[in-house]
Amino acid sequence: MRDRPAPLPGGVGVSRLRVYDTVAPDGLVGGTPHVHLCCTEGYVVTDGEGVVQTLTMAGCRETPLRPGVVVWFEPGTVHRLVNGGGLSIVVLMQNSGLPEAGDAVLTFPPEVLADPAAYAVAAALPDGGAPGADVRAAYRRRDLAVTGFQTLRSGGPAALAAFHAHAIALRQPLLTRWRQRWEAGAGRAAADTAAQLDALERGEPGYLGDAGVYAVNEPLERGRLGMCGLLDTYPAAA
């Protein structure tokens, strides 16, 4: 093992997720509907069963989840996990660091989305959702987001377009920091591949001799309150 930082492949983020198992206002069990503005998200289902509800300009969809299923969706897809029993997932997130920096926007009702201060209050969790924080706060924000999600699903493309516009307005002040994170993470990974291809074209093997092997023996933390459930998080680099 070499003791130096190395990003996960492609600059992705990895976490283990145990989906919430309490009932939301619409009678379904599961997580908080939200959207990502810059990140494609993927699920590898490891245990249990359920569905992921998605909403795009093409309409509503439900994708069944069971062990072995892999699902992914692009930025702009509103998504919500529904837990049919013991649903656990390995989450792969593009642009590791951006989701933690605010890339996700929850589907709160329009009057909350239109007020950055009100949105911040509604989205906040005690101690930032750190392990041991009161999970009831996560349920409260989920329930508010489910209320907004129900309105979105019945409102058609115009309602979704309005939600996207609110989400962009909320997050525009963060874009400079997002770009810096991307450049240091996924952008750097892509640039490294370009440099390696250039070296191979020149017949220069030097970088191959610098290869390292890395391992993380356990999650960085267990039980962080996420949008969809309890997260066991891993560092973005070894």
Image (cartoon, rainbow, N blue to C red):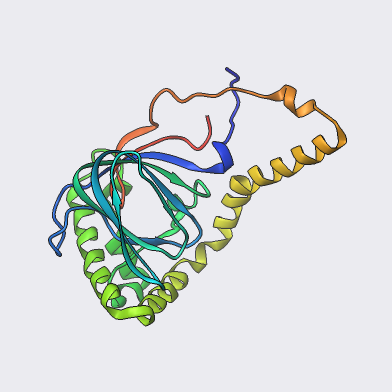
Total marks drawn?
Answer: 0
Classify 146 as above or below 133.
Answer: below
Residue at screen point 80% across, 26% down: 206
- Can you say whether 145 is above or below 134 in the image? below
- Side of 99 where 176 appears, left or right: right
Work out which residue is located at the far top of the displayed protein and give it: 1
| The image quarter in which residue 60 lies | bottom left
Among the 4 quarters of the image, the one containing residue 112: bottom left
Q: Is residue 68 above or below residue 165?
A: above
Question: Percent position (x, y) of residue 109?
Answer: 27, 73
Q: Nearer the viewer, residue 169 or 146?
A: 146
User: Who is closer to the viewer here, 76 or 111?
Assistant: 76
Q: In this view, does 128 lie to the left or right of 94?
A: left
The residue lying at 60 percent from left, 26 percent from top is 4
Farthest residue, direction right: 202
Give the image quarter of residue 175. Answer: bottom right
Vertical placement of 132 versus 171: above or below?
above
The residue depicted at 46 percent of the width and 35 percent of the height is 235
Of residues 193 and 96, which is closer to you in this image? 193
Quadrant of the frame with the N terminus: top right
In the rendered structure, the answer to whether residue 107 lies left or right of residue 56 reads left
**Does 178 sit left or right of 127 as displayed?**
right
Query: Residue at 30% across / 52% down in the picture?
Result: 227
Where does the image place residue 33, in percent across and percent down from the top left? Answer: 30, 61
Q: Position of residue 136 (x, y in %)?
A: 17, 51
Residue 181 placed where, x, y %? 57, 50
